[in-house]
Structure formats: C-alpha cells, structure tokens
Image: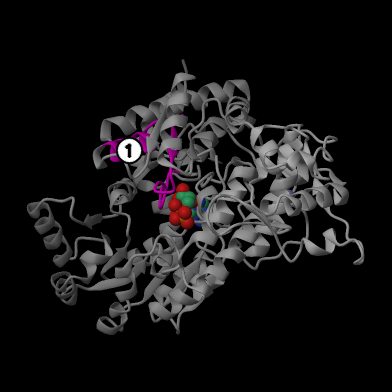
Amino acid sequence: MKRAHHILKSVFGYERFRHHQADIIEALINGHDVLTLMPTGGGKSICYQIPALVRKGTGIVVSPLIALMQDQVDAMNQLGIRAAFLNSTLSVAEQREIELLLRAGELDILYLAPERLLSPSTLSLLEFTPIALFAIDEAHCVSQWGHDFRKEYQQLSILHERFPAVPRIALTATADARTRSEIIEQLALGQASVFVNSFDRPNIHYAINESGNSRDELWSFLTENHAQDAGIIYCQTRKGVDTIAQWLSKKGRIALPYHAGLNQAVRQNNQQRFLREDSLIIVATIAFGMGIDKPDVRFVAHMNLPKNIEAYYQETGRAGRDGRPADAWMSYGLRDVVGLRLFTENSDAEEKFKRMMHQKTDAMLGLCELTSCRRIALLGYFGEYIDQPCGNCDNCINPPETWDATVATQKALSCVYRTGERYGAQYVIDVLGGKSNERIENNKHDKLSTFNIGHEHTAVEWRGIFRQLIAHGFLATDAEGYGVLKLTQKSWPLLKRSVTPQTVMLRKLRKAKSKKKNVSASASDLTAQDQQLFEQLRTLRAQLAKAQNVPPYVIFPDKTLTEMAIVKPHTQGQMLDISGVGQSKLERYGQAFLNEINNPI
Ligand code: ADP
Ligand code: ZN
C-alpha cells in the first residue's frame, strides 16, 4: 500500500484516497476479486489503474465503449502510464505493434472491447502474458433488463475459469440491487469483496417542472444559469432532437444533434466536438451518453419523461462529474404522463415484466409529482436513506403548495364516467369547461350534468389536475393506445360518496423560479482578478490540447486550474502541491503554466 500511496501522489498528483479507493486497491493488490459500485465521478478508474501499476504484468480493462478508448488512453499517457487499446478502429499493423508491446511486458494497461477479449486468439495471447488484473468496466452491461445490455458481457465469467489466479474488479455506477446481484451471478463474483459507495451526487441540483411551454422554460433556464456552459438536452424522438437543436442554433447557441438516425460520421463528429470544445450543447436521444466521461458537463436537461428512475439517474448523472455545481432539469406535461402510461400498457412483454414496468412507471411519476425532497426519494429508490432534506433540489428550496382537490377530482372522475370512458383528457376538459363544439353537441354531451361544472378552473389548470390524477392512478389510460381515460379501482371510493370520504391533495402549478444555492466552491467564487487568470490558464490549456488533439480536461481539469489561479505557485515544487499535478504533468506543462501565472498580461 505504500507504493499505492506513492503512485497516487507522484503520478496522479492527489493527496488522499477517496471513499473506498484504498480498501479496493488493497484487496486487488492482495489478489482478491472486487465489485465496486460508485456513482459517476466517484473515482472508479484509479481503483484499477493503481493496482495495475503495483502488481506485476499488464492490467486488462474490458470496456464496451470503443469510441472512448482513445481519450482514456491519451489521458493515461499524459500521466506517464504506458496504456494502449486494441479494437477494430486500428489497422492490422497497429494491432500487431500493440500485441508485441504486450508480449514484451511494455504495457501497464490495455483496453479491450468484450468481443475482442473473448476471441480465441486474444485469449491465447493472454495465456502467454503476465496479467496484473482484469477490470470489467460498465459491469451493468451484463443485465438484460437494462438498456445497455451486451450479450458478450454474460460470457466474461470465462476469465475466472481460464485465469483463476488473476484478480478481477467489476465496476459500475448503476445502483439498483437487482443489477448488483445479476453482476455477481453472471460474472461469478460470489467470493468478491463488495464496496458500495453512497450514490448521492450532492453537487447536482434537481428540478422537475410541470409546464405548458417547455421550450420557453428551457430557454430561460439556459440563459439564466448556463449561458456559456456545456450541457446535454435529452428528447424522446429524433424529430424532437432535430427541432430543438435547430431552434437553439437559431437563438445563437452552438447545439448539435445526436441520434441513431444520423450517420456514423456525423454522430462521431458531434460527439468529438462536444468533448473537445467548451460551451457546446448536445441535443440527443438516449442513444447518446453512455460512458461519456466529460467531467465539466454543467447541466442535463430532459424535455420529456425518462422511462424510469434508473434511466433518469443515469442520464442526469452525466452532469457535474468534476464535483462542481451542476443542474439536472426536467420539464414534462400531461402528454408525457399519458405517453409513458401508454408505453407501459402497450408493450407486448410478458405479464411479469409488464408488472415491473408498471411499478417503475409509478415510481417515476411519483418522483415528478412529489412535494418533498427529491433527493430523499431518489436515494430511497436505490435503497439508501438520508434523514435530512437536501437543500439542493427545487422542492427543498421552493416548497410546492398543495390544495384540497377532492371536489375537482370528483368532478373530473364523474365527467369521465358520464362521457362513457371513451375520450381523452382534452375532450373531457372541454366538457367540464362548458366548451361546446360539434363533436360534443353530436354526442349530446352538452346536455350532461357534468357539462360546464368545472368552469372555476382554467383549461391549463385542468390539464395539471388530470396529469396528477393519472400519475397518482386515479385515472388510467386505455390499452388501445389512443389516450382514452378509464376509471380505476382507486376512482370508485371518490365517485361513491357513501364510502368514508377521502381527501385528494394536489400540487399547485409553481410559478416562481427556484433559486439555487451554490453548494460548493467553484470557479465562480474566484475574485475578479483570479477569474481573469483562470481564463488565461484555460486559454493556454485549450492551445495545448488542440496541438495534441486531446480533450482539454486531459491536460488538467477545471478544479486544478482554479486552484492554480488562487494559489499562484511560483516554483516547480509549489506547482507539485496543486491537486491534480503529478510528476509527468509537471514535466510536460509545469513551466508553461508557471510562466502564465507569473507573467500575467
Ligand atoms: P468515474 O470513472 O467513477 O466516473 P473517474 O475515475 O473519472 O470517475 O474520476 C473522476 C475524477 O475524480 C477524475 O478527474 C479523477 O482524476 C478524480 N479523482 C479520482 N480519485 C481522486 C482522489 N483520490 N483525489 C482527488 N481526485 C480524484
Ligand atoms: Zn431536497
């Protein structure tokens, strides 16, 4: 472990291990298997990088993210670690060269895609190579319930059979218990030490808005909070992606689309620009983002409801990996709620699977309609309990008001009943509001007792009421897929007033913006003068990055630049004291940054 501490300081430039890093590293050095569950940005990579350097032989890292291997290897080479990858993007000659390096024991770390690792030729190549460890990154890909499922991952237990003496570490940022047990089972990790970190991401501010016009809301969210920041905007459909990207571009932001309908070259180019440039927005379907390890994504915005809390947490988790304040922002409305319910209803999955989907939908909608701390609910969903409201979500900062909606609910349910459970929300709202049109007249619904009994609420308010009634299960949508509203078991006690009266509390539409507190020190805490120096250092970093065609954060993360701008080191020794500056980076960049700091313009 002494060696491990020394490497942490001299290679990575960090003083202390975080969370369970030290225990994990010790277990691996001693030859034990490990399963690590840590949120994004928790510091997973060091957990296998350091033992790979301490133990004899090469550390083999299995990762499904071929597109990211180049950046990962670049980042390691910058630290002076001898890393490489083998995948289909390399020419045959390049692959040969790396195989030779591996055989000669010249590699500390080698990245492989699972299909490559499982090929007979690779497996026999590894038989003749000393191996320090196997790291199985993104281990949740073994789970066939998740949307990142990779069938090759289920064959990775072969590593245990063919190389029983080599310790393995499986890593994931997916928190739920089901996935955890699947990983243990599929990868034969029954004997592994399991390290579970808190999944809280305290620097992320969660906000979920129920809104009529999400585009306007998005625009004010962006201009007020992220006028110059990089971020991701998720939309449900490809068309939505294209529209929002074009609209933002017209408004003067650099916004690029990303979805499966674009050709590979365009997608790759857009992703690359997102990683390399500052202030760029990616508008994407969920096809984007797995393993995007850009640390300075300042916001993730959802223009629609994610399908479940797992997806929501994974997608929002791409914000703020560097630990600095970041936003998870969502806007959803009645249509989204109906859409998600329909999606669950219409799936042709078997009954057991469908029941599970219903539960997940309920939990997602419950989170949206919640009036208390979002973080308590989110973490609770993953089995983690905190007893204090977080103070960094919309509900904590600007508690929503509720109102007694029992009478409105009775009117709504009764109107659904009297119109024969054959119409969608808009029609029922028209009847309630006494809005006559041809269809309503033809159906003689203007003669119903419920016609015009809801005029005390506007149509917008009724949409909010129906959204919440569907979300809470007082109304269901039909299975045929037209959004027709049906009564549920939960409706009847309210319709038959003879039963013990029940109160329905709903939330009021929130008008005021939620004011955020800054939770941690960040670049914005710099004095004006330090801020200027910080900008200069950022420019220098951009030049150095561009010259080598690597992402800027591979040179130094923002955190390191901020510390340099505050501390203003004069000597190489002082430079080494800055967090994130190790020996290799000091040699490469120390002088350039010292010059910039000591000769400001
Ligand atoms: P993950 O893979 O878990 O999302 P990373 O391994 O990319 O996270 O680490 C996130 C960031 O935290 C990186 O910039 C990394 O260098 C930094 N980091 C990791 N461990 C430490 C530590 N012990 N002290 C300071 N920074 C750390
Ligand atoms: Zn909270």
The residue carrying mark 1 has its beta carbon less than 8 Å from ligand 1: no
Magenta stretch encompasses residue 527: no
Q: Is residue 258 left or right of residue 461?
A: left
Residue 236 location, x and y as percent? 48, 44
Q: Is residue 332 left or right of residue 575?
A: right
Magenta stretch encompasses residue 293: yes
Question: Image height check: is 563 above or below 159?
Answer: above
Residue 360 location, x and y as percent? 59, 63
Q: Does residue 313 appear anywhere in the picture?
A: no
Please give the range of residues in magenta: 266-294
Question: Image height check: is 279 above or below 296?
Answer: above
**How dense is the environment of label 1, judged by Cα within 10 Å: few (below 14), some, or many (20 and up)?**
some
Q: Residue at x 34, y 49 (%)?
A: 79
Q: Residue at x 52, y 26 (%)?
A: 228
Instruction: State the residue lying farthest toward the left.
Output: 93
- Look at mark 1 in the image and give the residue it sits on: 272
Q: Does residue 145 appear anywhere in the picture?
A: yes
**Which image quadrant is residue 441 in?**
top right
Secondary structure of the residue carrying numbered label 1: helix
Q: Residue at x 73, y 61 (%)?
A: 386
Question: Image height check: is 103 above or below 445?
Answer: below
**Quarter placement of the N terminus:** bottom left
